[in-house]
Amino acid sequence: MAGKAKGPWFWDQRKRWCATIGGKRVVLDADNEKAAIEEWHRRMAKAPNAKAAGSELLAREVLRLHVDFVKDNREPLTYEWYVQHSKSFCKLHGALRASDVRPHHVDSWIASHEWAKSTRRGAISAIKIAFSWAKKRGHIEDNPLAMVEKPARSRRASIITAEQVDRFREEMKDGPFRDLFLVVMWTGCRPSEACKVEAKDFDAVAGTWTLHGKTTGVTGKKRVVYLPEEALSLCQALAKARPRGPLFLNAEGNPWNRHSYGHRVRRMRAKLGLGTEVVMSSLRHLFITDALVRGVPIASVAELAGHTSVAMVSEVYSMLHQRTDHLREAANAVRGVKSRDRTSPSDEAE
């Protein structure tokens, strides 16, 4: 069975995984496809006159190996995110050899979808990370997508205002949704964090939630949400009523998710005549911007928001550029000048 190696296959007669290495059939010591592919890589790397393992590995195999790793080492939502983008990429280019994948294949894949800028950035990141991981693990010799550029992070055009929040609070008659809305507003947490927090995650003495967060799999650091007094009182009452399972449930007794709370926000937004900037995550943006305006150090704001660096706070979440009065006062403060009340030219003329 001499010829070019095309990866492991299952030999039905012997009920074993095999591969062609150096022109010869080799029985692999593996009981599933994932283990067979990994052993094949190791043997190909050591075989004399054999091509590097990655030269024959297909793009879909690279992505499958990566999502298998993510499944075992990351959060379920992260795994689903990678699976979604990997499947999408494989529909167009999964049959390519990994060594033949080029940046223009990523371009054509992105062009086949009508995605927003932030979604395009995330999709490109998912594929780039998979190929980078494969190179680091020795599955491929070179990363053909190392030079692919991602769109820059974009800010939201605007954020929810305090006045809009007040209108929402006046309109909310639903206790369960009101609880979820207020705790996100009070803490600046991600809505998804509030949806999954359970009584076992709540420490009434410390006034915190401790969660397996978005970056815990990478950093090993738990996500801690710090609860101001209003949020602490609310969580104490909910934990007493629900000692097991999620604290925040909808009127039907089910945990909130992005679809259910998103639907509720859209309905209220339409009723009140508010813009599309009013979403649950905009409460987080408002919290971060308010914290910076009130002089909370940016490192502390990053910790409160659950970010490992201050870059995301300053580049994406902060809406200080919309607080022109605050920025003008800050500019005056640099020179020790006290801000004065602004009056119109007609007022000064009088």
Image (cartoon, rainbow, N blue to C red):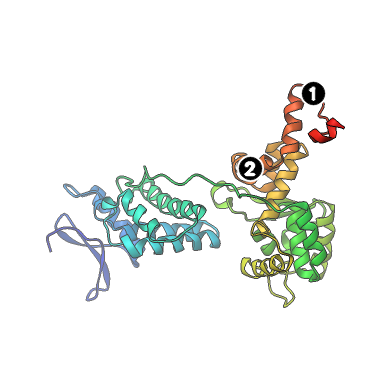
Say few, some or many: other residues with alpha carbon within 10 Å of mark 2 (under 14 / 14 to 19 / 20 or more).
many
Residue at 78% over, 54% down: 163
Foreground: 188 or 193?
188
Does residue 200 appear in the picture of this structure? Answer: yes
Which label was assigned to residue 47?
none
Residue 190 in view in this figure: no
Say which element carries label 1. loop
Q: Image quadrant for the C terminus?
A: top right
Image location of residue 86, percent across then percent down: 41, 60
Residue corresponding to mark 1 = 337
Closer to the camera in the image, 228 or 73: 228
Q: CA distance from mark 1 to mark 2?
A: 28 Å
Q: Which residue is rendered at x = 76% and y = 58% of the image?
A: 183
Image quarter where the N terminus lies is bottom left
Residues 183 and 275: in front is 275
Q: Is residue 182 above or below residue 99?
A: below
Q: In this rendering, which labeled residue sits more in front, label 1 or label 2?
A: 1
Q: Position of residue 122 (x, y in %)?
A: 48, 53
Please give the residue where the numbered disc 2 appears in the rendered image.
313
**Viewer-side residue, 173 vs 223:** 173
Please state if 22 lies on the left or on the right of 332 as rendered. left
Tell me: 256 left or right of 36. Answer: right
How many marks do you count on the picture? 2
